Amino acid sequence: MPKLKGERETVYAAIQTQTDKLKDLLSKMPKTIREEATYLCDTVKPQMQAVREQVDKAEGLMDKELYPFPTYQELVYSHHS
């Protein structure tokens, strides 16, 4: 099987790893609403950021003309142009 070009293989593997960690954290949700809120803020949210960082890297590796969706940058700042 051909290898992915550049750092794609590493980035895609990191996305999978970080997503698996997020799924695991979500399966361990506390039972009370107060504990759940703290868990989401202190544990789940940082893991969501870890996933986001890897997805942002992957987005940066893709040729913009091939990307079928607007980037976050385009969504947020398109009304300024």
Image (cartoon, grey):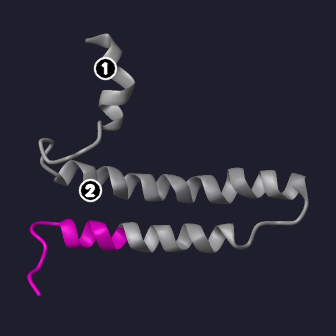
Q: Quadrant of residue 8?
A: bottom left
Going 17% across and 52% down the picture, which residue do you hit? 62
Q: Is residue 10 magenta?
A: yes
Relative to 7, is 78 above or below? above
* Helix, strand or loop for disc 2: helix
| Residue position marked by numbered label 1 in the rendering | 78
Magenta part of the chain: 1-14
| Residue position marked by numbered label 2 in the rendering | 58
Q: Is residue 72 magenta?
A: no
- Packing grade of label 1 (10 A; few <14, some 14-19, many >=20) is few
- Packing grade of label 2 (10 A; few <14, some 14-19, many >=20) is some
- What number of labels is visible? 2
* Amino acid carrying mark 2 in the image: Ala
* Comparing labels 1 and 2, the label whose residue is closer to the camera: 1
* Amino acid carrying mark 1 in the image: Ser
Going 61% across and 52% down the picture, which residue do you hit? 45
Percent x, y for residue 65?
12, 42
Q: Considering depth in this image, is 51 or 76 the residue closer to the camera?
A: 76
Rounded to the nearest angstrom, the CA distance separating label 1 from label 2 is: 21 Å
Going 22% across and 48% down the picture, which residue do you hit? 60
Relative to 60, is 19 above or below? below
Percent x, y for residue 81?
25, 12
* Helix, strand or loop for disc 1: helix
Quadrant occupied by the N terminus: bottom left
Relative to 78, is 37 above or below? below
Going 78% across and 53% down the picture, which residue do you hit? 38
Q: Residue furthest bottom?
A: 1
